[in-house]
Amino acid sequence: MSAIVKKYISRYIPIIGTLQNYNRDAFKGDFNAGLTVAIMLVPQGMAYAVLAGMPPVYGLYASIVPLLIYAIFGTSRQLAVGPVAMVSLLVVAGVGELADVGSDRFIQLAIMTALGVGIFQLLMGVFRMGFMVNFLSHPVLSGFTSAAALIIGASQLRNLLGLDLSGSKQVHEILIAALQRITEIDPATAIIGIGSIAAIMLIKKWKKTFPSALVVVVIGTLATVLFNLHTHGVAIVGDVPKGLPSFMSPGFDLNDIQALIPIILVISLVSYMESIAVAKAIANKRGYKVDANQELIALGGANIGGAFFQSFPTTGGFSRTAVNDQAGAATTIASVISALLIGLTVLFLTPLFYYLPSAVLAAIIMVAVAGLFDYKEMAYLWRTDKRDLGLLALTFIATLVLGIEEGIAIGVIISLVLVIYSSTKPHNAELGRLGTTNNFRNITRYEEAVVEKDVLIYRFDSSLYFANVEHFRETVEERIASHGEDLKVVILDASAISNVDSTGIHVLQEFIRNLRSREIDLYIASAIGPVRDRLKTCGITDVMGDRSFFFDVGDAIRCYRQSEESESEDTHSPLQTNC
């Protein structure tokens, strides 16, 4: 096999390159990290399955095959794939609209959702469409996740406190109901739940990599057995099926897929955004690069493969990836080790979870999502960008009031509206000379910049296209009017114009005719090569003449002054070149 073929295969199946250079030191780090993440993922996976509206064992199923497939195709050496709180919430919110939570029909649709997410992510990767996540701006994602944290926390109050609450998805309704039934709180359940939260937080404060979730699982289970708490009102997990997930077709009913498309799209984008963000952060720290489109292929493959082994949607998680990195993961072999250990757990250890209190799983979920409430970003935007803060707040409120899918959809739509609005009104400036130098700056920022009455130097900081041509026309005319009848030449600094479309060409032609009718010349300075080619192809160069194009503003000014002094066109010969 030639070196070129090996390189090509290794590009799309990165684990081959990993194994070619694998050594004992890498294995030591991977084994330690794989063991640590497996210990962490067993209780987390079960908790996130409960959050997703599914029996706990499905969290373990989702922690086996997806990890193995990602390890083969993923480019992040430390990313820990599996169930995550955000995706679990999206599953129960989206699929819960189509079937009763926890029913066989619900489970079937959740697994079908994993298949849909996998196919969509795989296609995004194959067609190099990773840019689509740019539609989820940071304020939108922050507002959405902050609202989701409250929704998740509220949804777990009944398990945490042993309350019989309705299945409402509205946070305020859940809180009101909880307050109305505060006297019905089961003391033993509340002690276990709140105590577990406190224990996890204290252990994390002491040592982040310590398996705090496993500690509370063990303590909570032992306490239940020793004191027979399950006979005194403490809800327990009960039977957790033993054995590896069997190969099953997730089904591909067209009507179901059509109904699931909105949640599939949301999960695909949100989960990829979460995954690629943490993968890039760790890769930058470690000094290597992740391939964004290959990550989409790997995550898509993980979800497709997982769907055939009874997995709901998975992605890379923030906390587990951080633990994986801190524990010494050197390659994706760490994920293989985690998957194998969880497989052994499913084969032999599930009976040990029979007496696990549901309150412990609720505590694990609530601690995990506490970090999703992004108050730091809110405070930062309050100081730096009120518009983005408004976008965050709008997404936050919409998600809380209207729902998960509606909230993120509104945030994305408002983001696009703001992008479109901003593109129609790009920044522009009138420039003045700084002293006797050849430097020209925005006169509103540099009070010392000198403006001459007979020369207008105007800079437009955007491509000139159909959406902003009116803004160009209005702002440049305002500048012309401010110079009055003394104006003899307009110099367009085109250094920030990267493209001109057909509408922009028409406006420039009209602008040139308008200036000539007022006996004002137009010079274009600092235009990049592609723009000059475009102007030449469309006839603007022929209308203006080659001598109206200049290297920079200084050349244009110098030429104008020379022609003014000599009153002869023979001296009108600026330097010419191709950019």
Image: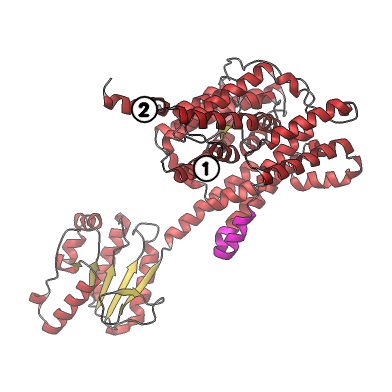
Of the residues shown, which amino acid type is indicated by label 2? Ser
Q: Which residues are magenta?
A: 374-389
Q: Quadrant of the N terminus?
A: top left
Q: Is residue 86 left or right of residue 328?
A: right
Residue 568 magenta: no
Q: Quickly name the residue at label 1.
A: 278
Task: Say which element carries label 2.
Answer: helix
Q: Is residue 336 left or right of residue 110?
A: left
Q: From what the image shows, is residue 557 above or below residue 169?
A: below
Q: Quickly name the residue at label 2.
A: 10
Residue 376 magenta: yes
Q: Residue at x 26, y 82 (%)?
A: 436
Chain-order first, disc 2 or disc 1: 2
Which percent across, then down, holds residue 13?
Answer: 40, 26
Q: Is residue 499 left or right of residue 571?
A: right
Q: Is residue 162 visible?
A: no
Q: Is residue 71 visible?
A: yes
- What is the tally of numbered marks visible in this picture? 2
